[in-house]
Amino acid sequence: MELRQLVMFLNVINHGTFSEAAKRLFLSQPTLSVQIASLEKELGVMLFERQGKNVILTPAGEILKRYAIDMLGLRDLAVRELQQYKNAIAGTIRLYSSTVPADYILPSLISKFLELHPEVYIELLRSDSSAVWEKVLAYEADFGVVGTLRNHNSVEYVPLQGDEIVVIAPPTGKYANWPQTIDLATLQKEPLVLREVGSGTQRTFEDALIEHGFDLNNFTVRARLESVEATKTAVLGKVGLAVTSRLAVKHEIAAGKLLAFSVKGLNLRRKFYLIKQKRKVLPPAAKTFSEFILAHKQGE
């Protein structure tokens, strides 16, 4: 039973004859008759009694009439609500982000967006870049923000903001006399605090080392920590130096609480990207928020 057959059925009732109903539906009378006969065959009952050119509903037809009106009414209601949904900026946005964007880029954007769209609820879930990719690939997020890219044909990405990985140290002792750029030989002599394996920051650092024929076996690693804040605390506690995002320590650098150094010869610049499944159709709120983020992206 198809909705179009129910439309034909109700038109026959409303107009009293097959010929008049066919005319109103822009169909030939034989086509309409075939469709009603097919409906009767599927349901196993007669819906009309034919009396010359006119038709009269059978008791079975009366039952179907009630349900047909309800079903087509629900169809119209669904269409109206979907039209409203198509234009409404409301509902929940589910967003996964790697640590640095989640802590230092997205919160201010979320605040501004919610001021403009108070009917929206945003769920920002923080993880490392590797886990964010998995969530996007599994359709568990409207979109994600990451610091590393993958070669995956089903995902589209747009550059969001530039960043630089720096070495951070406490502002005391010999570090206070270091130049703003140090070499790898100097860094090799220092104990290091690293981020977790799936971290985009960590991946950028290790890739840069590999380009110069180095790896972590050339360094003394004292700890691996799963957050930027824990890394900062470890550095201030003199556990070791750390590599982290300049965005994540800009306030501490400005306040003189931490020192930041570039590493000579290492390409430690990167970008953050907004990623989403190509086949995923974003709800209006999520689509508007992703466009808002890109419209407010900082210089690369």
Image: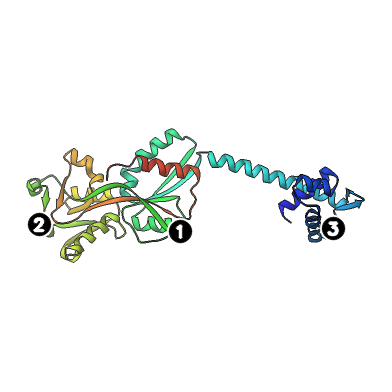
Q: Which residue is mark 1?
A: 138
Q: Which residue is mark 2?
A: 186
- Kind of residue indicated by mark 1: Ala
Left or right? Give the position of 272 relative to 192: right
- Mark in front: 1 vs 3: 3
Q: Which residue is mark 3?
A: 45
Farthest residue to the top: give it.
115
Q: CA distance from mark 2 to mark 1?
A: 43 Å
- Kind of residue indicated by mark 3: Val
Position of the N terminus by quadrant? bottom right
Whether residue 208 can be seen here:
yes
- Kind of residue indicated by mark 2: Thr
* SS of the residue under disc 3: loop
Label located before the other in sequence (1 or 3): 3
Q: Nearer the viewer, residue 189 or 96?
A: 96
* SS of the residue under disc 2: helix
- Mark in front: 3 vs 2: 3
